Amino acid sequence: MNSDIDRTTEGAIGDTIADGQAAATGLRPARELGPAQFRRIVELARLAPSVHNTQPWWWQVSGTSLELWADRERGLPVSDPLGRNLVISCGAALHHTAVAAEAVGARAQIEYLPKGADSDLMARIDLVPHHPSVEALARLTMLGQRHTDRRRFTSWPVPDESVAHLAEEGRRWGASVLAVTDRALRVEIEDLLEEARRRQQGDPRISDETEAWIDHDVADGVPSATVPRFDGARGERPTRFDSSLIADTTESVVRGTDGLLVVSTPDDGPLSWLHAGASLSALWLLATGHGLSVVPLSQAVEVERTRLALERLLPAPSRVPQILARVGWQEIGRGDLPRSPRRPVDELLRGLSRPA
Ligand SMILES: Cc1cc2nc3c(=O)[nH]c(=O)nc-3n(C[C@H](O)[C@H](O)[C@H](O)COP(=O)(O)O)c2cc1C
């Protein structure tokens, strides 16, 4: 995250928690939300993860609601022609909006795709004043800490029960989430992940698109400092984004100690994609709270051959894979990675006059 965001957003998280703790005593009635609260919610929700940190979203204030809109101009036409990852990213932003709203002092009532599946209006989030709970404030802390750390995990095993617990949390947001604890299934899925990575690595159009989003801008894209091993100066092409998470052989991955989750849905379309993104976001915040690192993996879904092969491996009725995630422990005491940047709130929030 750039230093400007560090200062203001970390301050916003601290202030929101302090306000929330005061409100949670119940001595103060829950307040109607005003411009400052809408702004605060968007400031926090924009920390959501997105494919290549494209941040393909914006919010509109409408009465007592916030509308979340997809920004198709921020799409990835080569790797994501349907906009699946774009809408999954919006689903993560939707979950982040709800988490932020609940910490700021409103219960979020979500209407998905209020203008239908062809509209860019992803959701209307009605904000009903409500005292923040202790859990809501804890989730906000996780929202502030969550980030993608692609460095190699330690060899500490992630217990199957922890992976199952994350899957359960993810399911609360509408998608199916499979904790891949069966070893034979894991071998098959790891093979498909590796095949997808190799296929994309061999496709210059994909590599060019990925490369264009590394250090794309001060406010978006993936900072090269967060991408282990990539060395543009030597003219290397980045993989997405690094090969160090992919072990040398499938066997060593399976003997490895990280966990794997598959987020899937019964069908393929914007509503399913929103659910998948919200589910990913929910399990990611819980993982952050447990000290676990999460790395989303979308290549095996982007490549048609591996997506169809994955579909045949998943249990009915939720056979359509949307995104996978690897979970593991990062080394304690390893230096923090720089945070990826975010677009300014003024660019993302419409329908609200700037505070004087
Ligand atoms: C839909 C989606 C797909 C993603 N796919 C990948 C991926 O295949 N590999 C990867 O390393 N990160 C992936 N990410 C993580 C993003 O690159 C990351 O969220 C973004 O750069 C912002 O950084 P942050 O998570 O640290 O805030 C994905 C994220 C989303 C929401």
Image (cartoon, grey):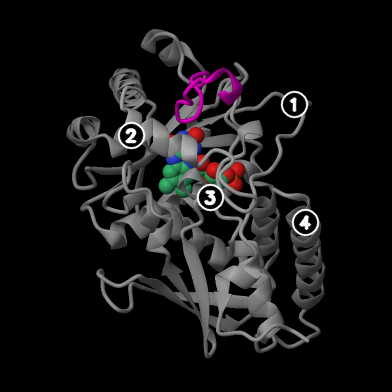
- Disc 2/disc 1 C-alpha distance (Å): 38 Å
Image: 153 above or below 28: above
Q: Of the numbered discs in the image, which one, if any, rests on residue 4?
A: 4
Helix, strand or loop under label 4: helix
At horizontal 24% and vertical 30% (from top left) the residue drawn is 306
At horizontal 33% and vertical 72% (from top left) the residue drawn is 113
The three-letter code of the residue at mark 2 reads: Arg
Q: Return the disc, 4 or 1, that comes first in the chain's sequence.
A: 4
Q: Position of residue 2 (x, y in %)?
A: 73, 49
Q: Position of residue 137 (x, y in %)?
A: 70, 62
Locate residue 113 relative to residue 100 in the image: left or right: left
In the image shown, does 61 or 330 lie closer to the viewer? 61
Q: Return the disc, 2 or 4, that comes first in the chain's sequence.
A: 4
Task: Provide the residue designation for mark 3.
Answer: 49
Q: Position of residue 249 (x, y in %)?
A: 40, 9
Helix, strand or loop under label 3: loop
Q: Return the disc, 4 or 3, that comes first in the chain's sequence.
A: 4
Q: Of the numbered discs in the image, which one, if any, rests on residue 332?
A: 1
From the viewer's perspective, is the residue at label 4 or at label 1 nearer?
4
- Disc 3/disc 1 C-alpha distance (Å): 23 Å
Residue 164 visible in the picture: no
- Disc 2/disc 4 C-alpha distance (Å): 34 Å
Q: Return the disc, 3 or 1, that comes first in the chain's sequence.
A: 3
From the viewer's perspective, is the residue at label 4 or at label 3 nearer?
4
Residue 238 visible in the picture: yes
Q: How crowded is mark 1: few (under 14 residues within 10 Å), some or many (20 or more)?
A: few
- Disc 4/disc 3 C-alpha distance (Å): 19 Å
Task: Provide the residue designation for mark 2.
Answer: 205
Q: Return the disc, 2 or 1, that comes first in the chain's sequence.
A: 2
- Disc 2/disc 3 C-alpha distance (Å): 24 Å
Say which quadrant the C terminus sits in: bottom right
* Main secondary structure along the magenta-highlighted residues: loop
